[in-house]
């Protein structure tokens, strides 16, 4: 079979998936542990977390203070 999806192959796969109906068997997480784990699925890094943003605000405030002190010298 060639690589890629021919219109015939696509139609056959569509018919099979409609017959299988996998979306009806999908339940998602049921336990609290599973829900907590799934809630982090879209998390890529902590760069936008509230704690990190607050830390950045403190860093920027300190830098601002340092600039003021250096300007006075």
Image: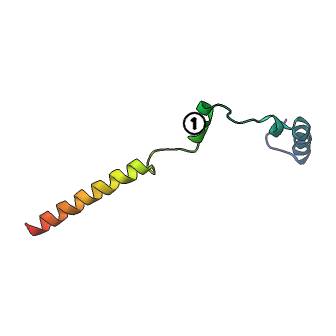
Residue at 17% in and 66% down? 68
Q: Estimate the x, y position of residue 49 in percent, counting from the top left.
A: 45, 49
Residue located farthest toward the bottom when viewing the structure as drawn: 72
| Element at label 1 | helix
Up/down of 33 relative to 65, above or below: above
Q: Estimate the x, y position of residue 34 in percent, counting from the top left.
A: 62, 32
Looking at the figure, which quarter contains the C terminus?
A: bottom left
Up/down of 43 relative to 70, above or below: above
Residue 2 visible in the current orientation: no
Image colouring: rainbow
Which residue matches tag 1?
36
Q: Estimate the x, y position of residue 2 in percent, counting from the top left.
A: 82, 38
Q: Estimate the x, y position of residue 70 in percent, counting from the top left.
A: 13, 64
Q: Residues within 10 Å of mark 1 (few under 14, many from 20)?
A: few
Residue located farthest toward the left when viewing the structure as drawn: 73
Residue 73 visible in the current orientation: yes
Q: Is residue 6 left or right of residue 37?
A: right
Q: Is residue 39 left or right of residue 49?
A: right
Up/down of 54 relative to 41, above or below: below
Looking at the figure, which quarter contains the N terminus?
A: top right
Q: Is residue 12 left or right of residue 24?
A: right
Residue at 64% in and 31% down? 31
Q: Is residue 34 left or right of residue 9?
A: left
Residue located farthest toward the front when viewing the structure as drawn: 32
């Amino acid at each position: 079979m060639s690589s890629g999806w021919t219109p015939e192959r696509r139609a056959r796969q569509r018919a099979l998936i409609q017959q299988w109906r996998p979306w009806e068997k999908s339940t998602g997480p049921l336990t609290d542990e599973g829900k907590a784990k799934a809630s982090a699925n879209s998390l890529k890094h902590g760069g936008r977390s509230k704690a990190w943003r607050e830390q950045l605000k403190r860093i920027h405030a300190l830098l601002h203070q340092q600039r003021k002190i250096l300007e006075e010298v």
